[in-house]
Image (cartoon, coloured by chain):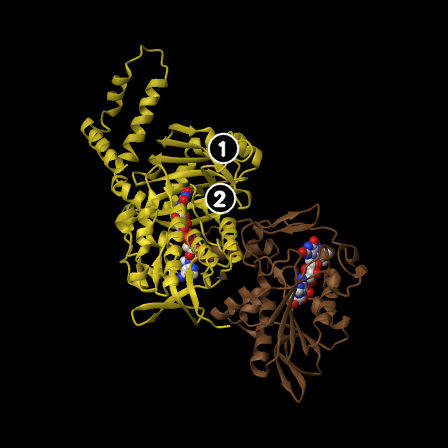
Chain colours: A yellow, B brown
Amino acid sequence: MKQRFDAIVVGAGPAGCTCGYSLAKAGLETLIVERGKFAGAKNMWGGAFYGPTLFQLFPRFWEEAPIERYIHRHRFSLLTQDSSLSAEFTTKKFGEPPYNGFSVLRAKFDHWFASKAEQAGAIIATGLQAEDLLWDRNTVAGIKAGGDELPASVVIACDGVNSDLTDKAGLRGKLLPRDIKQGVKEVIQIPRHLLEQRFNLSGEEGIAWEFIGSFTRGIPGGAFIYTNKESLSVGIVAQLSALCEKKIGANDLLENFKQHPSVAALLAGGNLVEYSAHLIPTSGKAMIPTLYSDGFLVAGDAASFVLATGLTLEGANFAIASGTAAAEAVIRAKQKRDFSRKSLSCYPELLKQSFVLKDLKTFKKASLFLENSRIYSQYPELACDLANKIFTNDGKPKKKIWKLLKNSMKDRVAFSEILRDLIQIKRAL
Amino acid sequence: MDIIVCVKKIPDPEIPPAKFKLDMESKRVIPPEGIPPVINPYDEQAVELALRLKDKYGGKITVLTIDNDADTSIVKHALAMGADEGIVLADKAFEGSDSFSTSHILSQAIQKVGNFDLVLCGRQAADWDEGLVGAIIAENLSLPLVTLAEAVDVVDGKLKVKRVTLDGYQIFAVPTPAVATVSNEVGQPRLPSGWGIISASRKQIPIWKAGDLDADPSQIGAKAVRRRLVKLFIPVREKKCEIIEGETTAEASVKLAERLRKAGVI
Ligand SMILES: Cc1cc2nc3c(=O)[nH]c(=O)nc-3n(C[C@H](O)[C@H](O)[C@H](O)COP(=O)(O)OP(=O)(O)OC[C@H]3O[C@@H](n4cnc5c(N)ncnc54)[C@H](O)[C@@H]3O)c2cc1C
Ligand SMILES: Cc1cc2nc3c(=O)[nH]c(=O)nc-3n(C[C@H](O)[C@H](O)[C@H](O)COP(=O)(O)OP(=O)(O)OC[C@H]3O[C@@H](n4cnc5c(N)ncnc54)[C@H](O)[C@@H]3O)c2cc1C
């Protein structure tokens, strides 16, 4: 029974499932260990899954995977205390296969994903936590889990943002609160017909809705609402260091958000069925650890592969793409029967060829730019105030919009600041 | 020593009662979504007791469960702890069974497994808390039964079973094969080891259907129930809070005592 595995993948999130699936499919003896009672048991995300990474693995996966809805509309809103200003985008293509994005709930989705890896031949050991690495001199030679030593030629850490194993392999320093956002999310059940009526959806259509504004009290972050079949995923994401400095709980910000009149109306009569919290590594390229060493690779959130541009938050597709690249590197290493650092060095090359490191490089200045507190208070206020002046009819003679804008800017933000921020946007986004 | 352990899947007992819903129509209890069910804690202790016997005397442990979703997760949990074989009994025909039909199905399965010295059940299933199944199996198979077992040993070819009582214990000597229902005094069940989880995860779990058992169709499923559930409801509990004031602590205490007496509490 006891054996040596070709590869042990730690964590059955999107990165681990992809990596384990690809390795098993290539015929490697693969073990995936997951500490949750089942894959997805304790996992959370906002809930929208973007891009073609998944259908490259499983063509027409939407026909079999537990998808909630396909995202056919994106909406973005600026909120002040009692007003909101929104923009929406939709296009016919988003409503047709292969679609552009999906809302999913992870308890079901990860479970499905892990079962695909199992069908491909990987062994999935759930309820098992990797406690430490096994070493053979300076080479990682497996893991310790459940009181046993489990030997393997290579270990792939897909253990998420808090990646203990990356720490233990000595590939990264302490995570800094400034580089991390705290996410909290509620799943709120709403009868299907009511949900579709409120969000103007039909069939399997869904909406991804992002918000920024006064509800974060100047803390860099935002909120989201994603529509599921019969529930809403409602959450906020806020920079950890700012929360600590201001001694505000992320949960308070979520309550703030939920009480906004435009939001409250969407949630009315709903039934809270799930609450969860999770961290997100959002500093992009600046916080990527060393990605490999002898007998060891890092992928997904463990490697901080998350793209946060303010308008979108993408991590799942980066997890899948990096899981694929890690598997490819290991398959090549297996052919050479050499799992040394040198042999695994094709991993970052593969990532550079894919969107993973390209996107993170393109947006490497985004996280710094997104720390600008004007984005979260002054600009939403300015925009809503201007809209208010344009749309309010008080029976008095109207002014030119330019005049109104100047008026709205007074005491809020100077032209020079706007100019500086515009230049920053050009650099960062 | 060869042991068969019956294990049941139940909703997690940690779920607060308010999260359950009732379907009055079909008289069913609906647990909240997303919280995975668990192995009945007493059954996990029965597996632990069986493993202690196996550690000492060797032999084979087979776990049985009736689960109409054909869910293998709790059988795999027992295998991960160290049991050798697991079988899931699943068939539409089993649906709606009461304790008698459940016991009939399990009795038939136990006979099909054959070759056993001891059958272990939990003292009760922590969902309905009836504590009947073990006893009915013993009756069905005409075997000796000890309830509330805390420990089992073998002395002179007989089982020595320690049974928990309110303020002490009894020791029974029973010939094999026998049935025992296991109490929580067994103590903490062992955690599955790494290799245990891996080998359990690899194992194919056979699913036995009604046709695989020599079950009497008139004894299983909803049509065979001997008891009818008349009403299922959540009792209304009222809570009231009254603040009793007083100038001094003594005065407030006296008033409190008077109030409690008036309410009939003391
Ligand atoms: C509030 C929020 C909203 C988000 N919204 C989106 C979104 O809309 N779109 C998007 O694409 N991304 C989103 N993300 C990001 C996305 O969730 C992550 O990028 C993605 O899940 C990363 O996948 P992963 O497999 O690397 O890690 P994870 O999904 O974190 O999986 C890690 C797994 O490893 C397991 N594990 C950890 N340690 C061990 C150990 N020692 N032993 C065994 N198992 C272990 C964990 O239990 C877990 O199952 C969001 C994240 C949050 C928090
Ligand atoms: C009137 C009535 C209606 C019911 N309707 C339903 C219903 O609609 N749906 C429903 O799910 N339940 C229903 N039940 C509960 C169900 O009949 C019993 O839970 C089931 O028959 C097991 O009996 P028990 O709970 O009395 O187990 P107990 O006698 O308390 O269990 C003792 C031990 O027996 C063994 N055991 C019990 N059940 C199993 C099993 N399934 N597999 C393996 N071993 C087992 C275990 O070792 C357990 O520790 C109903 C019960 C009643 C009284």
Q: Residue furthest right?
A: B218
- Is the CB of mark 1 within 8 Å of ligand 1? no
Front-most of residues A184 and A25: A25
Number of marks in picture: 2
Front-most of residues B149 and B205: B205
Q: Could you tell me which quadrant the C terminus of chain A lies in?
A: top left
**What residue sits 70% from the left and 69% below the top?**
B134
Q: Chain of mark 1?
A: A
Q: Where is residue A273 shown, x and y percent of the image?
A: 52, 46
Q: Where is residue B104 shown, x and y percent of the image?
A: 75, 65
Q: Are marks 1 and 2 in contact (CB under 8 Å)?
A: no
- Pointer 1: residues within 10 angstroms few (<14), some, or many (20+)? some
**What residue sits 49% from the left and 70% below the top?**
B195
- Secondary structure of the residue carrying numbered label 1: helix
Q: Chain of mark 2?
A: A
Image height of A423 relative to A140, above or below: above
Query: Dot 2 corresponds to which residue?
Result: A104
Image-quadrant location for residue B107 = bottom right
- Secondary structure of the residue carrying numbered label 2: loop
Q: Is residue B125 left or right of residue A262?
A: right
**What residue sits 46% from the left and 64% below the top?**
A29
Identity, as a three-letter code, of the amino acid under mark 1: Gly
Q: Where is residue B184 shown, x and y percent of the image?
A: 58, 71
Image-quadrant location for residue A313 = top left
- Pointer 2: residues within 10 angstroms few (<14), some, or many (20+)? many
Q: Where is residue B127 shown, x and y percent of the image?
A: 63, 59
Q: Residue furthest bottom?
A: B156
Task: Give the number of the mark in front: 1 or 2.
Answer: 1
Residue B248 visible within the image: no
Q: Which mark is residue A95?
A: 1
